[in-house]
Image: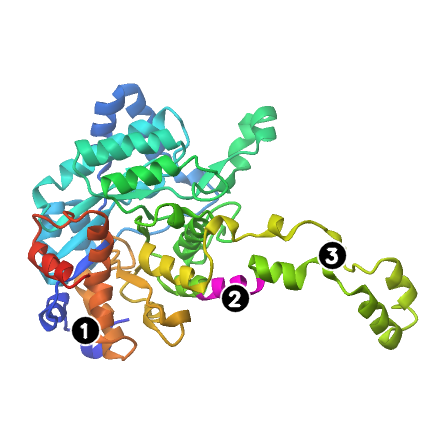
C-alpha cells in the first residue's frame, strides 16, 4: 500500500534513484478476442475457430459462480488499454520506471486448461503466433511468453521448437497442474469425467516421460515458468460466491506444488542447468518450503529412517517394561506383549530403502537443497508483497541462503490499478529497511537477468538493457 507521502511519486521517480535498470519478470497483456480468433482460424480453419469462439463467449450466467470484476475501468482504463496495445505499453514503461519487461497472456491462463486433444494444439499455436505478431515492433523493451502445452510430452517439444525456432520467442510458460479423470470413470461414465478430474504434475511420478521436454528447454535456452492458480472444484479455494477467498494465495499454492514436485522428482538433479520460474505467488512460500525441507531431510533421510523409525528395531522389552511400570488396568504389559507394535502403522515391516522419499531427489545433504534453490529456482513476487523480504533473510534461511525473488509487476491485472505506482510500492521494502540496496537490485534486476541470460546468453541482445546486462555478466551475475 503506497503511503500518503508517496502518492505523488511515480515509477519514474524511483527509477531516477537507482543506478541499475529495472526488468519486470511478469507483466500482462490482455488479448483481444477478435485477434485471437483470427489466428485460430488461420491455424485450424473456420470450424475449429467456431468451436473455440463458443467457448470464449459462453454465457457465465448458467454457472453457480458469480461474475467478478477483474478488468480495470474508470481511472484505470488507460492501463487496460496499455495491456491490450504493446506499442502503448512500451510508450508508458518510462512512467512506470521499468526498462524492460517480460509479458504473459491473460487469456493464456484459460488456454492452459484446454483438454480437448483436437482444439488444444491449434489454440496454443495460434496464441503464440498472435504474441509474436503483437510484440514484433517493441522487442527492444518488451518480450512475450509463449504457451507450451504439457498434456503430452511430444506436443510440448513440438511447440517449443516452433515457438523458439520459428517465431523467435524466448520466454515460455507451461501448464504444470494437469488434470485427467480416473480410469474407471473415463471408461464407465465418460460424460461425468469432467466432474471427477484428478490433478497431477509433469515433474513427479512420471518416470522420464517429460525428460525430453526439460532437455529441449535446455537446448533452446528457455526457462520453464508456471503461472498456475490452485482454485476451483476439488481444491481448498472453491467458493461459488467469494472471489477473494478463492484468489488469496492460490498462485502460491500452484507454484509450491510444481516446485515441490520438481525437487522430489529430481528434475534439477538430472538437468542442473535448467532454471525454473514460479510466478505471481510470491517468495514467502518458497522460503517456507526451503526451510521445511531441511527439517524433513534431517528426520526422514535414509540414515534417519533406518536409525529412528524402522519398526524392526523397536525395543520390545523396553516397551513391555514401561507398560509394567506405568500402565493401568487397560494398558497392561500382557496386552502390549501380544502386539507390541502399536499403533497399526508400526507393523509395516519393509526395508528402509522402500520408504526413502528423498531417493529420487539425488541430494546427499542440506548443501544440495541450498544449491538447488539458489541455482535452479526463481520466485516471482509482486511489488506490494512484503513477504518478499524473507527471501533475502540470511539469518532466517538455512545456510544463510538468499532465494531468487524477482519482481513481477502484474501490470494489466486488477491488483495494479495504476502501473506508475508499481515501483513506488516495491521501493517501500527498501525504505522500510526490510531489504538492503543490494537485495533490491537483485529483486528488480540481477536475479531475473541471471535466470533468462543464464539459460540464453543472448536473451537481452537488441534490448535497451543489453549493455547493462553485459556489464552484469562480466561481474559474474
Mark in the foreground, 2 or 3: 3
| Residue at x 23% of width, y 43% of height | 221
Q: Of the residues under marks 2 and 3, which one precedes in the sequence? A: 2
Could you tell me what secondary structure mostly forms the magenta stretch?
helix
The stretch of residues the image draws in magenta is 291-299
Q: Nearer the viewer, residue 254 or 21?
A: 21
Q: Secondary structure at mark 3?
A: helix
Q: Residues within 10 Å of mark 3 (few under 14, many from 20)?
A: some
Q: Nearer the viewer, residue 318 or 387?
A: 318
Q: Residues within 10 Å of mark 1 (few under 14, many from 20)?
A: few
Pinpoint residue 477: horizontal percent, then vertical percent.
19, 61
Q: Of the residues under marks 3 and 1, which one precedes in the sequence? A: 1
Q: Secondary structure at mark 1?
A: loop
Pinpoint residue 34: horizontal percent, then vertical percent.
21, 33
Badge number at residue 113: none
Q: Secondary structure at mark 2?
A: helix
Is residue 57 visible in the rendered structure shown here? no
Query: Is 87 on the left-hand or right-hand side of 1?
Result: left
Pinpoint residue 287: horizontal percent, then vertical percent.
40, 65
Q: Quadrant of residue 375?
A: bottom left
The answer to whether residue 295 is magenta is yes
The answer to whether residue 221 is magenta is no
Circles 2 and 3, Cβ within 8 Å, touching? The answer is no
Pinpoint residue 127: horizontal percent, then vertical percent.
25, 35
- Residue tagged by mark 1? 7
- Residue tagged by mark 3? 312
Badge number at residue 295: 2
Q: Quadrant of residue 330?
A: bottom right
Q: Quadrant of residue 369?
A: bottom left
| Residue at x 30% of width, y 27% of height | 122
Quadrant including the N terminus: bottom left
Mark in the foreground, 3 or 1: 3
Amino acid at each position: 500500500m503506497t503511503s500518503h507521502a508517496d502518492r505523488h511519486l511515480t515509477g519514474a521517480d524511483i527509477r531516477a534513484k537507482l543506478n541499475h535498470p529495472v526488468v519486470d519478470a511478469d507483466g500482462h497483456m490482455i488479448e483481444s478476442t477478435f485477434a485471437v480468433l483470427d489466428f485460430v482460424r488461420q491455424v485450424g480453419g473456420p470450424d475449429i475457430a467456431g468451436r473455440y469462439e463458443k467457448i470464449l463467449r459462453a454465457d457465465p450466467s448458467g454457472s453457480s459462480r458469480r461474475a467478478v470484476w477483474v478488468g480495470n475501468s474508470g481511472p484505470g482504463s488507460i492501463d487496460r488499454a496499455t495491456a491490450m496495445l504493446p506499442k502503448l505499453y512500451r510508450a508508458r514503461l518510462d512512467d512506470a520506471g521499468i526498462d524492460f519487461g517480460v509479458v504473459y497472456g491473460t487469456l493464456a491462463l484459460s488456454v492452459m486448461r484446454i483438454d480437448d486433444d483436437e482444439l488444444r494444439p491449434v489454440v496454443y499455436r495460434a496464441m503464440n503466433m498472435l504474441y509474436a505478431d503483437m510484440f514484433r515492433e517493441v522487442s527492444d523493451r518488451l518480450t512475450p511468453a509463449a504457451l507450451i502445452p504439457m498434456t503430452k510430452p511430444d506436443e510440448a517439444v513440438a511447440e517449443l521448437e516452433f515457438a523458439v525456432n520459428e517465431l523467435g520467442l524466448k520466454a515460455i510458460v507451461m501448464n504444470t497442474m494437469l488434470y485427467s479423470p480416473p480410469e474407471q470413470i473415463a471408461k464407465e461414465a465418460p460424460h461425468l469425467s469432467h466432474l471427477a478430474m484428478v490433478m497431477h504434475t509433469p515433474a513427479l511420478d512420471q518416470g522420464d516421460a517429460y525428460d525430453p521436454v526439460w532437455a529441449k528447454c535446455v537446448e533452446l535456452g528457455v526457462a520453464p515458468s508456471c503461472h498456475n492458480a490452485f482454485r476451483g472444484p476439488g481444491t481448498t479455494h472453491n467458493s461459488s460466491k467469494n472471489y477473494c477467498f478463492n484468489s488469496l494465495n492460490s498462485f502460491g499454492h500452484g507454484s509450491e506444488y510444481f516446485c515441490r514436485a520438481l525437487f522430489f522428482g529430481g528434475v534439477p538433479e538430472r538437468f542442473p542447468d535448467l532454471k525454473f520460474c514460479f510466478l505471481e505467488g510470491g517468495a514467502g512460500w518458497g522460503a517456507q518450503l526451503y526451510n521445511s525441507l531441511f527439517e524433513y531431510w534431517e528426520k526422514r533421510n535414509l540414515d534417519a529412517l533406518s536409525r529412528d523409525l524402522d519398526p524392526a528395531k523397536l525395543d520390545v522389552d523396553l516397551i513391555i517394561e514401561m507398560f509394567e511400570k506405568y500402565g493401568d488396568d487397560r494398558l497392561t504389559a500382557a496386552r502390549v506383549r501380544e502386539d507390541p507394535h502399536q499403533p497399526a502403522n508400526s507393523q509395516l515391516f519393509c526395508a528402509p530403502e522402500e520408504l526413502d522419499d528423498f531417493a529420487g531427489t539425488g541430494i546427499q545433504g542440506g548443501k544440495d537443497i541450498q544449491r538447488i534453490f539458489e541455482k535452479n529456482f526463481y520466485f516471482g513476487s509482486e511489488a506490494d508483497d512484503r513477504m518478499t523480504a524473507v527471501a533475502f533473510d540470511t539469518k532466517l534461511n538455512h545456510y544463510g541462503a538468499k532465494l531468487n525473488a524477482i519482481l513481477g509487476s502484474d501490470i494489466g491485472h486488477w491488483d495494479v490499478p495504476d502501473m506508475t505506482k508499481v515501483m513506488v510500492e516495491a521501493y517501500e521494502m527498501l525504505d522500510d529497511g526490510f531489504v538492503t540496496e543490494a537485495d533490491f537490485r537483485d529483486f528488480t534486476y540481477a536475479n531475473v537477468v541471471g535466470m533468462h541470460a543464464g539459460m540464453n546468453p543472448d536473451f537481452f541482445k537488441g534490448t535497451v538493457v543489453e549493455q547493462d546486462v553485459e556489464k552484469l555478466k562480466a561481474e559474474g551475475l
